Structure formats: C-alpha cells, structure tokens
Amino acid sequence: MASITIDNVIKDYGTTRVLHGLNLDIREGEFVSLLGPSGCGKSTLLFCVAGLEPISDGQIRFDGTDMAQRSSRDRNIALVFQDYALYPHMSVRENIAFPLKRLKVDTQTIEAQVKWAAETLGLSALLDRAPSDLSGGQRQRVAVGRAIVRNPAALLMDEPLSNLDASLRVHMRTEIKRLARELGLTVLFVTHDQEEAMVMSDRIAVLSNGYLQQFAEPMEVYRNPANRFVAEFIGSPKMNLLPGADSKILMGLRPQDLTPASSADASDAYAVTGNVALIEPAGPHYFLDVMVNGQMVKATANEIDGIGQGSEVKLTAPAHRVYRFDSESGVAL
C-alpha cells in the first residue's frame, strides 16, 4: 500500500479555481475522508489523485514518487463510485475478475484472487449470479471486490454508499472499515455525510469552496473545530451560535452540551433562558427548540417533566464546552 502526498495542489477549470493550494499527507494504510458540502472540491481532488483530472500546479506523490507523468492506469489505484458500474452481461465472478483479465494475469491467479475477494466480502455463494439478481448492498460489495482483487496501492471511493438505504449504509460502512483494516488499505473516501466520516476515518479533511479547513482525527475535529465552518458542519444537530458579550465574539454551543438547568450545575456554567417552541422526541432523549432573545436555540433533555411548549426554561452548558469564534473571520479563539 502507498502513502499519498498532496503538495500545494491547485486545480483550475479555465479561469475558475476550484482547488486552492491543498496540502495533505496521507499515511500508508490510513483511512482518510474528504468531507464537505456539494461543490467543495472533494470529488475533484479524488479525481486528481486518481489521474482522471490533471492538476494545474503542485504535486501528487505516491510513496514519494511524483505522479504527474503517470496515467490513471499506471498509478495502481482502484476506484469505487456511487454508481456500482457493474457489467450487466457478466456474472459476479466475471465482474470481479475483469481487472485481472485486462492485465492478462494467468487463469490460476485470477481464480485464486477472485476466490479470496469473494470470501473476504461474503460473496462466495453469489459468484454465478447476474448483477440484476443482487440487492444494492450486494452490488456495492461486488464493486469493492472488483477494486481490491488486484491489490491496489490505494483505494479511492467517491460517495460509494449514497445509493443505499439507511440500514444498508450503516452495515456497509462497517464492512468497508473492517476490510480496510484487515488488508491494510490506504483509503481516500469522499463523502458529504459527517457521521459517515466520523465513524469510518482515521483522519478527516474538511473542505469548503476548494480550501482545506481542518485535517485531524474525528474527535479532534468535533471537539476542537478550527473555525466556525467546521464547527457548524460537524455534528448533528449543528452547533448553536450566539452573540457574546463582546460583539467581536460568537459563542458556540452544541445541542448535546446545552441542557435544562439543575441544582447540580456548576456556578461557572454558561446559562441562557428562553421559551420552549418545540419538543422533538429523538429516541433516548428529546431535542428542545428554545427561543432565546429572538433566536432559536437547539438543546437536549433526557426527561421533559415540567417542560411544555411555551414554558420558560433555563439552559446551561459546562464552561469547557463553550466555543468562541471571531465574529468576522470565523477562526476559533
């Protein structure tokens, strides 16, 4: 498996710059997610790493070797897309074997590699089926099998779970993470789903408008966001932002940290008071929409005894869970 170095990479489409000098060092065997909203440049960066798009400036290196003069075929990478892109006239066996046949690998090796990939992904009983006879999750596993069968230097995945329903997405992200760890794969994974990135990644690169906002481990991104954009994008429901005593400061409070006050709350806790506008049951807890000084604030409650729509409620958060951002630049203070 390969390490991947993205060194001051710039990508222009005509006069429009879509990647602005990105720098990322992806270690061998690391699972890195490129996370951000639509149009942030994450898929473009993936295609540049794959060699499907030329870069305008900078370098992309695999194990220290510059890839500028190497085509996608010569980079020994495997791609998995949102669309499974399976050949409908081929069986599962033939789909998985296809990359090896293109490389003119001998028949015995192909059979061994297909058997290994099928066993790894739980596809052994499906090898003679057509793609049309498979579920969405099974088709995605076949696409992954076709990608790993030739032992690529890196596995690049572009929104591979977006076409699956919620339960299948949860199952497949567990399977992909397990596979990456067992095989020691270097994975670059594009997603707009922050929960997906949090649970799967060793590190997350958060992008916005072609700029790298933060590159760190999942809980570091969550607990210590570099700026307002990262703070609002990571976490569901998103962080509340309230004006501070100083007009140059915004106070950030995650809904999970903001709860109805109790006598046990520390005297130095952050506190606000407002009126309950909506109570939303959410399984093990409730979300409260509370109007505070003309602004809707989201909070969390384990119990709602004595709390009703329109009632006044005091909300508190531990002082160490209150974030501060520069109101103009958005940089964390």
Image (cartoon, rainbow, N blue to C red):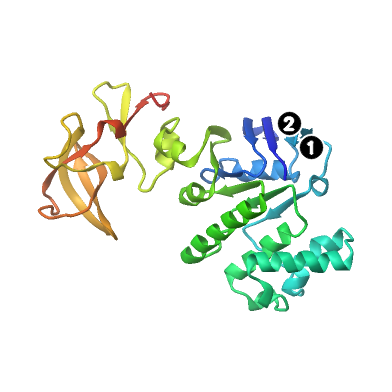
To which quarter of the image does residue 139 belong? bottom right
Inspect the image, locate mark 1, and give the three-letter code of the amino acid beneath it: Met
Residue furthest front as drawn: 182
Residue 307, horizontal then vertical, whole percent:
13, 52
Q: Quadrant of the N terminus?
A: top right
Q: Is residue 56 visible?
A: no
Residue 262, horizontal then vertical, whole percent:
13, 42
Q: Left or right? Give the position of 306 relative to 77.
A: left
Report helix, strand or loop for mark 2. strand
Callout 1–callout 2 Cβ contact below 8 Å: yes
Which residue is labeled 1 in the image? 67
Residue shown at 64% from the left, 47% from the top: 187
- Whichever of labels 1 and 2 marks the residue nearer the N terminus, that label is 2
Q: Left or right? Give the position of 232 relative to 251.
A: right
Q: Is residue 182 above or below residue 28?
A: below
Q: Between residue 50 and residue 224, name the one nearer to us.
A: 224
Residue 321, horizontal then vertical, whole percent:
30, 34
To which quarter of the image does residue 6 belong? top right
Which residue is labeled 2 in the image? 59
Inspect the image, locate mark 2, and give the three-letter code of the amino acid beneath it: Gln
Report helix, strand or loop for mark 1. loop
Residue shown at 65% from the left, 44% from the top: 29
Q: Left or right? Give the position of 249 relative to 94.
A: left
